[in-house]
């Protein structure tokens, strides 16, 4: 089957209609999401979870004004300045998701693009766009959040100040997969795919030399790609790193003969204590000025590319371009049957072709496996034959 890649679909958003209807009801118009109810099942459906009895069972669902102790809703912001330090992880094991968000916040407009709702509202209606298997999907949530009963603070991610975007993003992520616990454990490239719709990939550090790692990451940094890394599962904690933990990779810097990366722990604390850490003697005033160094226990730190290779298992990245045009083409693929697609380019350009399959998190069948795929890129010649120019 040969098809032309010319399909185009625009996502129809529904949150504005919900918001308009609620506003017409006055003060009583508050959104209570019927698809993601305020009960323990959407927090954790598994009674054997380590936090079920102690935390989840006693959770209360509170709105922002109750959490922030602020009756004037106009003082509660969706975005109050976007900064990687806005994020502090709670008891949910979603460091891969939070570090992906943190990496995106290095480019505030990219984060805002995820949110269809641009401002907070007393009706509590919030809309985000995620890309599920490459297809954009609107996820609408209310602003009731699971909190500790004793102090009225969120159980999961916590914001810095009276802003909501971190809390709302995490809740929308949980709704997408059915409950909060279903989102635990994952890879940054998986989260980045959902959040940006951009092609994403992952590189194992053991498969690359120090020079190759530096060349890849420094090049991607110059192109403003979104980058994150994950530590080795057995990295010693006395180095100031968390084993098997995700970190956003903010930037790459050449400091004299040293090549260093700037990273951030989504916990907002607990940092690397080796070469180029906050107390390292390698820092000179010139180096500090060059990278905008600040000594603080904020989760942000610097380390050399050599230490990065020793301590990090892999790094993930999104080939994100601010002016890129994306499209998708859903295909039902019969077994033992190939699909062929044609496209034309009228000038040299950078093009990414990305194949996705149904994500395992959406499949209830424990035996579900991803299918092997072969991707061929062919160039049509004047004589009607095709020349293979790429295979993966």
Image: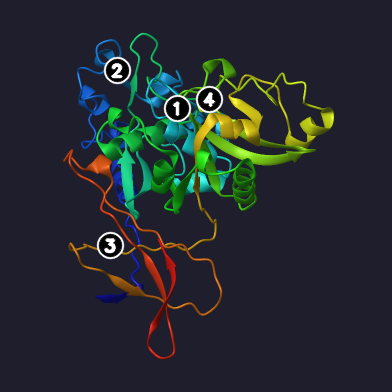
User: Circle 1 sits on which residue?
Assistant: 244
Foreground: disc 2 or disc 3: 3
Mark nearer the viewer, 3 or 1? 1
- Left or right: where does residue 174 sit relative to residue 353? left
Q: Position of residue 342 (x, y in %)?
A: 36, 76
Sequence-wise first label, 1 or 4: 4
Q: Quadrant of the N terminus?
A: bottom left
Q: Do the CB atoms of the residues marked 1 and 2 lie less than 8 Å apart?
A: no
Mark 1 residue element: loop
Q: Quadrant of residue 71?
A: top left
The residue at the point 51 percent across, 53 percent down is 319
Cα–Cα gap, marks 2 and 4: 21 Å
- Give the percent coordinates (x, y) of residue 199: 44, 54
Alpha carbons under labels 1 and 4: distance apart: 25 Å
Element at badge 2?
strand
The first of marks 4 and 3 along the sequence is 4
Q: Which mark is residue 160?
A: 4
Q: Which of disc 2 and disc 1 is earlier in sequence?
A: 2
Neighbour tally class for label 3: few under 14, some 14-19, many 20 plus, Cα within 10 Å: few
Query: In this figure, which residue is indicated by the disc labeled 3?
Result: 330
Label located before the other in sequence (3 or 1): 1
Classify 10 Å Cα crowding around label 2: few (below 14), some (14-19), many (20 and above). Answer: many
- Image location (x, y in percent) of residue 27: 33, 32
Would you place residue 289 above or below residue 44 in this image?
below
- Using the image, tell me which numbered label, if any, was put on residue 60: 2
Where 117 falls versus 289 (above or below)? Answer: below
Report how far apart the C-alphas of labels 4 and 3 lie in the structure: 40 Å
């Amino acid at each position: 089957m040969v098809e032309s890649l010319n399909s185009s679909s625009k996502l129809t958003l529904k949150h504005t209609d919900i918001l308009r209807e609620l506003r017409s009801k006055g003060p009583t118009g508050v959104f209570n999401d019927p698809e993601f109810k305020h009960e323990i099942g959407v927090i954790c459906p598994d009674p054997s979870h380590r936090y079920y009895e102690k935390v989840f069972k006693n959770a209360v669902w509170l709105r922002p004004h109750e959490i922030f102790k602020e009756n004037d809703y106009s003082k509660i912001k969706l975005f109050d300045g976007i900064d990687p330090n806005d994020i502090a992880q709670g008891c949910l094991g979603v460091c891969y998701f939070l570090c992906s968000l943190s990496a995106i916040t290095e480019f505030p407009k990219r984060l805002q693009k995820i949110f269809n709702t641009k401002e907070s509202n007393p009706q509590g209606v919030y809309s985000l766009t995620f890309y599920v298997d490459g297809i954009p999907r609107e996820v609408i949530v209310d602003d009731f959040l699971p909190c500790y009963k004793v102090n009225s603070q969120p159980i999961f991610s916590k914001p810095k100040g009276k802003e909501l975007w971190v809390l709302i993003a995490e809740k929308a992520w949980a709704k997408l997969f059915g409950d909060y616990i279903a989102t635990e454990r994952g890879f940054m490239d998986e989260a980045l795919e959902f959040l940006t719709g951009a092609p994403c990939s992952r590189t194992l550090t053991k498969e690359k030399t120090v020079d190759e790692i530096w060349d890849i990451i420094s090049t991607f940094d110059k192109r403003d790609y979104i980058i994150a890394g994950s530590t080795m599962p057995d990295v010693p904690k006395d180095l100031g790193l968390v084993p098997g933990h995700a970190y956003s990779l903010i930037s790459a810097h050449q400091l004299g003969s040293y090549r260093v990366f700037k990273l951030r722990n989504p916990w907002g604390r607990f940092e690397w204590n080796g070469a180029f850490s906050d107390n390292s003697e390698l820092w000179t005033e010139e180096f500090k000025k060059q990278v905008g160094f600040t000594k603080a226990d904020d989760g942000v730190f610097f380390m050399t590319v050599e230490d990065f290779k020793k301590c990090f298992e892999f790094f993930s990245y999104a080939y994100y371009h601010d002016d890129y045009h994306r499209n998708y083409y859903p295909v039902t693929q019969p077994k033992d049957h190939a699909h062929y697609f044609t496209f034309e380019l009228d000038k040299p350009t950078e093009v990414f072709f990305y194949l996705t399959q149904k994500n395992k998190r959406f499949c209830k069948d424990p035996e579900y496996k991803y299918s092997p795929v072969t991707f061929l890129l062919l160039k049509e010649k004047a004589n009607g034959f095709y020349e293979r120019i790429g295979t993966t």
